[in-house]
Image (spheres, rainbow, N blue to C red):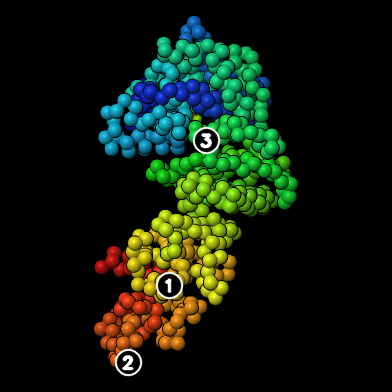
Amino acid sequence: SDKKEEIEFQAETRQLLDIVTHSLYTDKEVFLRELVSNASDALEKLRHMQVSGEASGSDDIPLEIRITTDEASNTLTITDTGVGMTRDDLVSNLGTIARSGSKAFVKEMQMKESMGAENTPDPFGSGIIGKFGVGFYSGFMVADKVDVRSKPATDTEADPLVWESTGTGTYTISALDQDIRQDRGTSVVLHLRPDMAKYAEESSIETILKKYSNFVGFPIFLNGKRVNTIDAIWLHDPKDVDDEKHTAFYKYVSHMYDDPLSHIHFRMDAPIDIKALFYIPSFHQEKYGMGRMDPGVSLYCRKVLIESKSPDILPDWCRFIKGVVDSEDLPLSISREKPQDTALVTKMRRALTKKVIAHLSKMMKKETDKYKEEFYKEYSFFLKEGICQDHDSQQALSKLLYFETSKGMNGELVSMDEYVSRCPPEQKSIYYLYAPTRQLALQSPYMEVFNKNKQEVLFIYTPIDDFVMTNLGEFEGRKLKNVDSSDLDLGDLKSDEKDKESEKDGDQSTSSAANSLNQTQADELCAWFKANLSTKVGECKTTDRLSSSPAVITGNESAAYRRIMRMVETSEG
Ligand code: ADP
Ligand code: MG
């Protein structure tokens, strides 16, 4: 039909557009990177469909990006010969926010607004768009109207459509004027704002493109002239890639605009051929209330994309890592159903995970401050998740953790290795105490015997750490013991009152003061406790683990289990 459909933007999109168009953000040129990367994504998608037979590869249209500037009409056009979009694609891809970065942006924006910052001129700071990138919508930073002409690769008979918007409340979709040629793929036409006229000049576009276009895996032509040489830097010798190149490539692969915290660049031939280049961003996006991030590493075979953001080549906990893996041993279309492919990918995942852990461990030893202050603060949660879910890596990951301890100063962090190296030789277990705060941990009656014996105890303050300890069970052959367990082997503590040991195995034990009571009185007291607390206490015994507190509760089951039971009881009660 040749009718023009007018459709409203989804509310979140409207908000985003409002910020984008009115933002004082100075680094507006990022719009070009966003649009070129969309063009490149569209081409990758098509290439993939051609490899798998979903789209025909028989037409003679090359896979490329063409950019044209027109100073007379003050426009800039970015054309690709990629997958293109149907009417429904236009609605769902350009009318709603699908992109996680944009969603994170809107979340942060709403948060700031609710904090009453909406009256300041640039309430979100120029940093935020810069941090996330806002994808397609960034075109509205420089244009007061955007046209998207598209012809889908999946339906070569379809008439090309045009999506048009001024970036306010609505957009329209209609059949493209017959006079305008549109082959397979998409053209984004930016009608530049009068003050953005420089983006209609070839020289300024060329300068911007030069900065990153060599990472784009398809030829880019600017007014007919080729501007990029395709540079797969992950295939280079790691020694030949400098920081500047890394930063530029990181921004390209991650779609982020910060500088990476660290990179891992390596090659190996055994057990399989792998060239990999990984980046750790300076921050992760899950803290923005966004839910889980997608995996960030794509799989290539000799520079050809096999799978974008593969969920299989790294374990889940590594999802903060961005980058690429290239392997000559991979079939061009990898299938999760074929057992030989699965075996290959498993092998690859093991090798890559080991490399990641080795890198972190090196950073922990050689750049301890950076590791603690920048990496660990931001990513410890992911390591802990790994301990609970990735059993192959569990022990190796536990060496990357830090805890506060009873001996350290407030906030001082100690690794498990450090803890063990400070233990007296006769101590066979690693002790930890779970308390809401350091203050409460230090005052806990469970600490008495450890203080008396000058024994160090790890302090943990969150349910996640408690879960980690329970999951881990032991560290290098030493049992991890909650100080509230009833089977503390106090024999391995240098107790000066060891001869008075009277604690035996049992479910629950309470009471001290055995010293001031004779055995008969103590037995009577225990019997009285048992009789009066019969539903709550399994057993009541004397102990020498306490010196000033009258009693403690201990148990055989894990502390975590008891806490869960307590929650169940309260919710039932
Ligand atoms: P992202 O690229 O992170 O998904 P964008 O806002 O940049 O987010 O783009 C939104 C969506 O619009 C893309 O996911 C894609 O489906 C669609 N899109 C944008 N540009 C193109 C294009 N040139 N060709 C085909 N689809 C496109
Ligand atoms: Mg994009």
The amino acid type found where label 3 is placed reads Asp
- Which residue is depicted at the point 28% across and 84% down? 529
Classify mark 2: residues with Cα within 10 Å, few (<14), some (14-19) or many (20+). Answer: few
Q: Are marks 1 and 3 in contact (CB under 8 Å)?
A: no
Residue that badge 1 annotates = 450
Q: Quadrant of residue 306?
A: top right
Question: Which percent across, then down, holds residue 400?
Answer: 54, 55
Q: Residue furthest bottom?
A: 520
The amino acid type found where label 1 is placed reads Phe
Question: Which percent across, then down, holds residue 106?
Answer: 37, 34
Residue 259 appears in the figure? yes
Mark 2: secondary structure? loop
Dot 3 or dot 2: first in sequence order is 3
- Which residue is depicted at the point 41% across and 66% down? 433
Dot 1 or dot 3: first in sequence order is 3
The amino acid type found where label 2 is placed reads Asn
Dot 2 or dot 1: first in sequence order is 1
Tell me: 219 left or right of 258. Answer: right
Q: From mark 2 to mark 1, how far is it between C-alphas?
A: 25 Å
Q: Which of labels 1 and 3 is toward the front? A: 1
Quadrant for the C terminus, please: bottom left
Question: Which percent across, then down, holds residue 381?
Answer: 46, 52
Residue that badge 3 annotates = 259
Residue that badge 2 annotates = 518
Quadrant for the N terminus, please: top left
Question: Which percent across, then down, holds residue 331?
Answer: 69, 42
